[in-house]
Image (cartoon, rainbow, N blue to C red):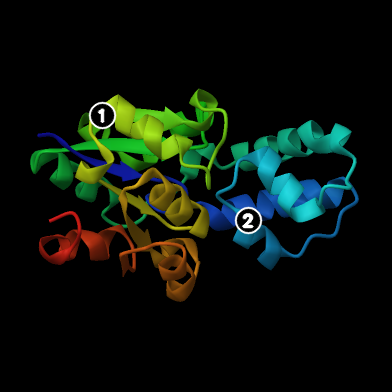
Amino acid sequence: MERAAVFDVDGTLVDTNHLHVTAWWEAFRQAGHQVPMHAVHRAVGLPSSDLVAHLLGEDRDTGRDEELSAAHKALYGQYFDRLPALPDAGRLLKRLHRDGWAVVLATSAGGAELSALRRAIDADEAITATASADDVERGKPAPEPVEHALELAGVPAARAVFVGDTVWDMRAGSRAGVRCVGVLCGGIPRADLEEAGAEAVYDGPAHLLASLADSPLA
């Protein structure tokens, strides 16, 4: 039976979390909101609408949500030509593909942003499918993105592992019934990832690749 290795992208395979923090911080600043960068960092990984609600609260002017999201998108888009893949991210996906895993990306990115991320990873031949937030009604930490990734791979949850860098990833994977692996390269502490459902935690793609034989992806 096929096996699926499902990967978050931002902060897991590509070193973009702090670029997102800077872009969101500036978008909020331009709109007159003072949101601490550390708070933005903890919210990265949520869909845009959920991130805004999480940081500004339910009593905000929701009519400006799309404006904030558009500002973040425009600011972050300035980096598309130089997004840095994390060390060995592409090699990890290619190795798993050779080992018989169906590699699926589960990301909130789409369009030009997703294309830029895939160019950075440089492992298209190893990627079976991509599950975008545009394909589901609710993004992480809801299980739908991971469940959709499993549908694309044609693999049951019991035969899948989800790799991510945020508590939202771990919660989504746990709710979808898959084994969860955390990585520290997104900047979230090990204890937080483990509390949210990570079965194992690695420094990043290079560490996971070097440790495959003893990992949930063995």
The image quadrant that residue 195 belongs to is bottom left
Q: Position of residue 177 (x, y in %)?
A: 34, 47
Tell me, yes or no, whether the two marked residues, 1 and 2, touch with CB atoms within 8 Å.
no
Of residues 141 and 215, the one nearer the viewer is: 141
The answer to whether 34 is drawn above or below residue 102 in the figure is: below
Please indicate whether residue 44 sits to the left or right of residue 128 in the image. Answer: right
What's under tag 2, amino acid-wise?
Ala
Q: Quadrant of the N terminus?
A: top left
Q: CA distance from mark 1 to mark 2?
A: 28 Å
In the picture of the structure, the residue carrying the numbered disc 1 is 153
- The local crowd at label 1, few if under 14, some if 14 to 19, many if 20 or more residues have their Cα within 10 Å, is many
Closer to viewer: mark 1 or mark 2: 1
Q: Residue at x 80, y 33 (%)?
A: 67
Please indicate whether residue 211 sits to the left or right of residue 116 in the image. Answer: left
Q: Position of residue 15 (x, y in %)?
A: 45, 54
**Regarding mark 1 in the picture, which secondary structure is present there?**
helix
Q: Position of residue 12 (x, y in %)?
A: 40, 53
In the picture of the structure, the residue carrying the numbered disc 2 is 43
Q: Residue at x 44, y 58 (%)?
A: 165
What's under tag 1, amino acid-wise?
Ala
Q: Residue furthest bottom?
A: 191
Q: Position of residue 31 (x, y in %)?
A: 87, 45
The answer to whether 190 is drawn above or below residue 100 in the figure is: below
Please indicate, yes or no, whether residue 52 appears anywhere in the rendered image: yes
Q: Residue at x 35, y 33 (%)?
A: 149
Sequence order check, earlier mark of 1 and 2: 2
